[in-house]
Amino acid sequence: MEFDESLPPPDHRSSLLTVMLTLIGGSLFLVILFITCGGFIIPIGAIVAGVAVIGVIHYLLWGHSLSEAVADEREQHEATDPMADDDWPEERFSSRRL
């Protein structure tokens, strides 16, 4: 992929605004849940966090090693697959067209 100098630089202020508004909205949502459920949301959150931790441990133990184990097969499949061609014109999917 070549660098396109005609594109404007990314606006970090809008990215920060998006993150801050998401954090504020999410925090407000959690406070409302806490108030309406009478604190019952804390055990539910602990269960969800526990499932997420188990998922991360599962990936670290099995997923990463499995991905490395089948890397050769994946490369061989991508080399023989005619639809895996990544030489699409960039203008076709550009957001400037919209």
Image (spheres, rainbow, N blue to C red):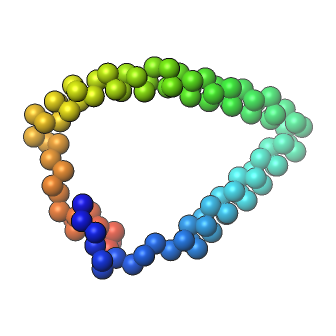
Does 6 sit left or right of 82 as displayed? right
Q: Is residue 76 above or below residue 7?
A: above
Q: Nearer the viewer, residue 36 or 34?
A: 34
Does 59 sit left or right of 98 as displayed? right
Coordinates of residue 89 in the picture (x, y in percent)? 17, 62
Coordinates of residue 16 in the picture (x, y in percent)? 61, 67
Q: Nearer the viewer, residue 75 or 17?
A: 75
Q: Which quarter of the rendered picture does the N terminus lie within?
A: bottom left
> Residue drawn 24% across and 65% down?
2
Number of marks in the rendered image: 0
Coordinates of residue 75 in the picture (x, y in percent)? 20, 33
> Residue drawn 57% across and 24% down?
57
- The image quadrant of residue 45 is top right
Q: Nearer the viewer, residue 24 or 79?
A: 79
> Residue drawn 62% across and 61% down?
19
Q: Which quarter of the rendered picture does the C terminus lie within?
A: bottom left
Does 36 sit left or right of 85 as displayed? right
